[in-house]
Amino acid sequence: MKKLFSVLKYTKDYKKYTALNILFNILFSIFSVFSISLVIPFLDLLFKSNLSDYQLIVSKGEPIPGLSMKGIIDWAYYHMSFIIIGQGKAQALILICIVVFIATLLKNMSRYFAMYFLAPIRNGVVKDLRNKMMRKALHLPLSYFSDERKGDMMSRMTTDVIEIEWSIMQSLELIFREPLIIMISLATLIFISPYLTLYVFLLLPVAGLVVALVSKSLKSRSAKGKVVFGQLFNIMEETLGAMKVIKAFTGETFVQNKFEKVNQDYNKISIGLYRRADLTSPISETVVLGVLLLILYIGGTMVFDGTGGLSGAEFIGYFAVASQIVPPIKQITLAYNNLQKGLASEERIEKILYAENPIVNIPDAKKIDHFTNKIEFNDVSFAYHKGDTGYVLKHINLTIPKGKTIALVGQSGSGKTTLADMIPRFYDTDLGEIRIDGVPLKEIEIESLRKQIGVVTQESILFNDTIENNITFGMDTFDKEKVIEAAKVANAHEFILKQPNGYQTNIGDRGGKLSGGQRQRISIARAILKNPPILILDEATSALDTESERLVQDALTNLMKNRTSIVIAHRLSTIANADEIIVMNNGDIIERGNHHELLMLDGFYKKLCDMQSFK
Ligand code: ADP
Ligand code: MG
């Protein structure tokens, strides 16, 4: 029950709608029971054959209809008797039909309005949740995304949210509508025959218990289903992004088999889940019907014996109202089942929403708006997996003065990218600290820090959008002239003009409609437009052929003018002019100095140069 209210916390921004929904649900329950109860006077009409019964009622004079049920009914009977005596039974029948019709109309209108006000709640909750998850996802540190899989995230953001939508609706009904119908029906039953209702009270909890037992295991099964569905999403996401490799390595069958296997697992879990869920309503219906039949028997004998003052018409009415209780009980069990499934989703969503984010601003973080002096690494160590003994960076000491170019070289896996990633604070140091102009990174407001830094990586990261929007990415306003200027400096202007729609050309998924060199020059134009004082170039030319490398290299040289640069390069030709070259091996700095000093050293760097026959 506590869990049930925990789902409802999502509706707290929609109090007005929730109140209206509850109001109309109450009206709905009242009109439902009312329209059914009208069967009693109708039966009365059929069974009572002599007029003297009615004359007796009329002769007592008009009762004053108080707020009590009895008062209202006496009042109604008085007027009905009056009509029967004056205008005949047929006329009274018409009257009953009209009243039933109006009651049904009101009941259905109430139901509609209850749903009408539920719609903005359901959809609003889902909208809010998605926004919240996206915001959270955007602020989680990079390390989160190398551990969690994208497909799983996506399945949480889509299907799990929809599951919540259902849970919310079901629980609103569960809490406000169905129990109300049951309560109002029970009140009517007590009114008609308190004695008989005693049996109902004794028997109903038994029915409830049986149903609760069946739906108990649904939650854990549903959670398992969600995990497998996330795997399905992963394969889909990976497959769609890797079509070229799959086709080139003729891996279609392999991927298809992998997919079908997971899909089969999901299928199996889903079938089990459906079967169990489908079991609950037949069981509950059978149990509740058993209860009703018992009541039919007990009530029937009461009518035969004339005990308890129950008339035949009243008993049939009683039975009609009692059978009204069955659908709400069924609904409650169904809703309870769905809620169990929804709670499994809620846990998955909250795992993202409450994921710890270690990289956040400290309370009064310092905003920086320029870079004046130097970046310092003081004895910095870092490991991706905490608790691991092996640090990826080991006691790094490094000073990068303003306006200088520092190059990082070393074998693949030696920690160059990791070192560069520490500067925009993609990761936090484990030991030691990094300072910019003397201020520790952890004390600088992250956004203002990243505004000072431009990054160009090996794979150009572009979006499925126009060239212009890719260059101006992250800017709210921009000057078209400046965009063109940046593109010119990046050697991109000419090829952009040759595109079908110039700057407004869509470049396809991840920029797939452009060549590698063109993509890279767009990334460079983006960095130029941002105009950051600090620049990180991580193998920016490594993926390119010699021809486009020259164009990109020129663009990079333009970009690096008057900036502080950290350049990671594979090809030594790109770094020979650096002010300081840092040679890394296995997380350590093993050699440092300029090109000539390092060649003289005749060490690791010299070997690298010889391998590339670089003079
Ligand atoms: P480089 O850029 O010099 O090739 P990296 O800095 O990318 O090297 O990697 C250094 C080491 O850290 C490698 O052993 C690599 O396996 C590991 N590594 C890199 N990125 C991650 C990551 N996101 N999670 C765990 N380990 C990583
Ligand atoms: Mg790297």
Image (cartoon, helix red, strand yellow):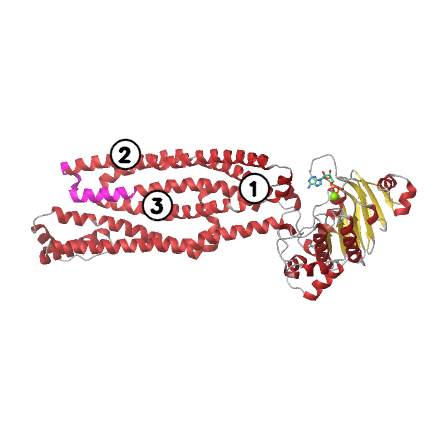
Spatial CA distance of label 3 from label 2 is 21 Å
Determine the CA span between mark 3 and mark 1.
43 Å
Mark 2 and mark 1 in contact (Cβ < 8 Å)? Answer: no
- The residue positioned 67% from the left and 50% from the top of the image is 461
Query: Looking at the image, is mark 1 or mark 2 nearer the viewer?
Result: 1
| Residue 366 visible in this rendered orientation of the protein | no
Please tell me in which quarter of the rendered image ligand 2 is found. top right
Q: Residues within 10 Å of mark 2 (few under 14, many from 20)?
A: some
Q: Quadrant of the N terminus?
A: top left
Of the two numbered discs 3 and 2 on the same chain, state the one appearing first in sequence.
3
Going by the numbered disc 1, the residue's amino acid type is Met
Q: Which residue is mark 1?
A: 236
Local packing at callout 1 (Cα closer than 10 Å; few below 14, some 14-19, many 20+) is some
Q: Give the number of the mark in front: 3 or 2.
A: 2
**Mark 3 closeness class: few <14, some 14–19, many ≥20 residues within 10 Å:** some
- Judged from the image, the secondary structure of the residue bearing numbered disc 2 is helix
User: In the depicted view, which residue is nearer to us: 121 or 147?
Assistant: 147
Q: Which residue is mark 2?
A: 290
Residue at the spot of label 3? 179
The answer to which quarter of the image holds residue 206 is top left
Left or right, residue 141 beside residue 606 = left
Report x, y in % for residue 353.
Answer: 56, 46
Secondary structure beneath disc 3? helix
Q: CA distance from mark 1 to mark 2?
A: 49 Å
Question: What residue type is disc 3 on?
Answer: Pro
Q: Which stretch appears magenta? A: 304-325
Tell which circle, 1 or 2, labels the residue nearer the N-terminal end.
1
